Image: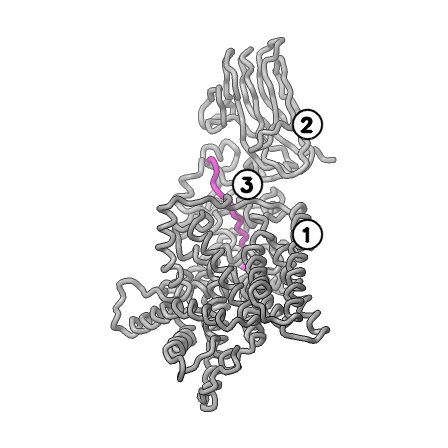
Amino acid sequence: MFSKLDKYNSYAKKGVIPLLCIFLLLNIFLLSKYIFHEYLAYFHSDSAAKVLLAVEIYDRGDFFPKDWNYVNSDLFIVFGHVFIIPLLKFMMPGYEVHAISGFISAFLIMLGVAALLGAMKVPRTRVIAVLAVVSAGFSGFVAENFYGQVSYGPAIYLTCFLLCSCIHFLDDGRIGSGRAWAGLFFVILFLVVWANPVRALVIYCIPLFCALAYPLICDTSISLRSKNALKVLCCLLFFSIIVGGVLHILTLRGVNNVYGVASAKWLSYDLMVRNIGLLMQEFLAILGGIPPANDSVTSIWGIYFAARLMAALLIMVLVPVTVLRIFAKNSVIGTIPVIFSVIAFLIILFFQVFTSVPEMSDSIQSARYLVPSVFLLVLLTLVHPMDYKRDFIFSAALLAVLSVNIVSAYFNYFRSNINSQVSINSGEIIEGRVKFIEFLAENKLNYGYATFWNSGKNSVLSDGRSLIRQVLINGGLPMPMRHLSSNAWYLPDAWTGETFLMLNQEESKAIDWARMKRMGAVPYRVLKYEQFEFYVFKENIAGIIPGWDYEYRKEQSFRADPQSLTQVGKYIGSADNDGGVIVADKGARGAVHYGPYINVGAGNYVVTFNVDAEFNEKGSVRLDVASAPDQRIINEITLDQMDKPFEMLVIVNKLRTLEFRVWALGEGKISFKSVGIRRVID
């Protein structure tokens, strides 16, 4: 396919390769500076998750920690945390280990690209040029996804190695090396299916099957050996899905899994049209082609942005042209990567436009789903043969795109934020973050809680010296956010001594401080730093606020208060009174109390109902414990009278959400005071 590349081009003999090598080395240097320093300004809690998971794995000695909460059945297997785990033996769990992991991922991306281009027999000059483009980051948005957070970095290098092994297996007639490539092909597919079968089907398996099936069905000129090799790869594909899927199910049974997003839903016609209109913005953001609004067009930067915009528009034209040309050549080795990329792109594009999967209120960030497939399509375009004598327009346009992207590393890494918008204050942001960490240390704020975007990142930026665990505010109370977090963080014995709540003004107003006071969670000092307020408690509030400890080794009591859930009762008592009750008069029928919908781990528990119920031989009150949302009753009893607390044994065989219900039967006055739960030690 590439045998005639640069046939008429003598530039390589006149210094093009040395020049490209210089740009490649320069871009790698800028990339390293971005990873190890510049990204400090944009480091966030999603980026920090892999460091926190690596710490849990290292501390627990288990690659799948039983206390960790995975999201949407997404097991972390081939991800950046793998490179962090061995570093923790001699390094602090801080930004440095994150950066080293990011640098290793960047190396694997470039190695994967080089391996794929080598398998496709791309000439050395073009390989170096493309690596210079890849190391330049494409855009601030892509740089963050590949080298900063590295959210899609593994998808890129795994895809490159997968296609590389596929091509080598088809192209290599030797039995020994063929088995090695087939083994690599199977291992990669097995790992991605094990991690998340649904994602693997969408990103890898369906596109790959289409790529392998196309030459089998449509190309009558391929050899018998190639047909047999394609059939072997198809068999390995299906076998990896079966083995990886079974292991995924077995692994998932031993870990905690929460669902962070609802299932995909169809959008209305108006929203579909809106999403189609946003696609241009998404593509330009990925390709670094969005000029800053209201900036001068005739300035030096304005001219540069014009070049970036033109390069982005050109690549959007060149990609479909390249795809059609590769299909026209009807080469097995050429069509497999392009079919894979096109199918992967179309699948994601379908979900992007017609379903609720992406959050299109931030269309640029939602474009991250398109990044891997767009990257592969651009990659295949950048290595397409150029012939200036026979195809001058295409070749000149491709050369312009290569040139603009090769020299864009500085802007992508140091003048562009994660939304591909112009940013020039990263130094101030980094300095502010350093001062914030110093403030935490000076005030001995060693263990506390904050909302997601203010928690994990600061735990990592402080090298683990100030651990801030993520919470959400629910019903006026801070509650554990069990999303890429460990249940062990929220146990009363996770930290002994002072703890703090770090809140901004809006979050502080959302806290029901009167309710906190009734529970005994009263801050003894309040500190302020910029927009944050730090409420410092003398003890760990995890042992005070009900619902934090899944296992309830210490009894937790849920007292009647104005926020208690009821159907037929009326709360009696002041907001600051510990002795409040919910009363249902005789004749009332329904739930005097229900909720509070707490998560309870597997085990045996005693639930104590503190209720007064007037005597009636027909039955005055019914007590039950039910799971939510299925309303399955775990245990229940009907009593004719209650004048003292009643204990009920509850057996929970897996993590469940429970509610404790008190039902008035209309035969007497019912007064609900509290309900408590404690674990029975076997």
The mark nearer the N terminus, 2 or 3, is: 3
Label annotation for residue 247: 1
Q: Which amino acid does label 1 sit on?
A: Leu
Residue 240 appearing in the image: yes
Q: Which of 108 and 545 is in front in this view?
A: 108
- Estimate the spatial distance between the alpha carbons at disc 3 and disc 1, rounded to whole Å: 38 Å
| 469 in the magenta segment | yes
Circle 2 — which element?
Answer: strand
The mark nearer the N terminus, 3 or 1, is: 1
Q: Which of 643 and 163 is in front in this view?
A: 163
Tag 2 and tag 3, C-beta contact below 8 Å: no
Q: In which quarter of the image is the C terminus?
A: top right
Q: Position of residue 132 (x, y in %)?
A: 47, 76
- Estimate the spatial distance between the alpha carbons at disc 2 and disc 1, rounded to whole Å: 35 Å
Circle 2 residue: 649
Circle 3 — which element?
Answer: helix
Residue range (magenta): 463-475
Q: Position of residue 359 (x, y in %)?
A: 43, 50
**Residue occupying the point 36% across, 55% down:** 278
Say above or below: 226 vs 239.
Answer: below
In this rendering, the label closer to the viewer, 2 or 3:
2
The mark nearer the N terminus, 2 or 1, is: 1
Q: Which residue lies furthest to the top in this view?
A: 617
Tag 2 and tag 1, C-beta contact below 8 Å: no
In this rendering, the label closer to the viewer, 3 or 1:
1
- Neighbourhood count class around disc 1 (C-alpha, 10 Å): few under 14, some 14–19, many 20 upward: some
Tag 3 and tag 1, C-beta contact below 8 Å: no
Circle 3 residue: 541
- Estimate the spatial distance between the alpha carbons at disc 2 and disc 3, rounded to whole Å: 27 Å
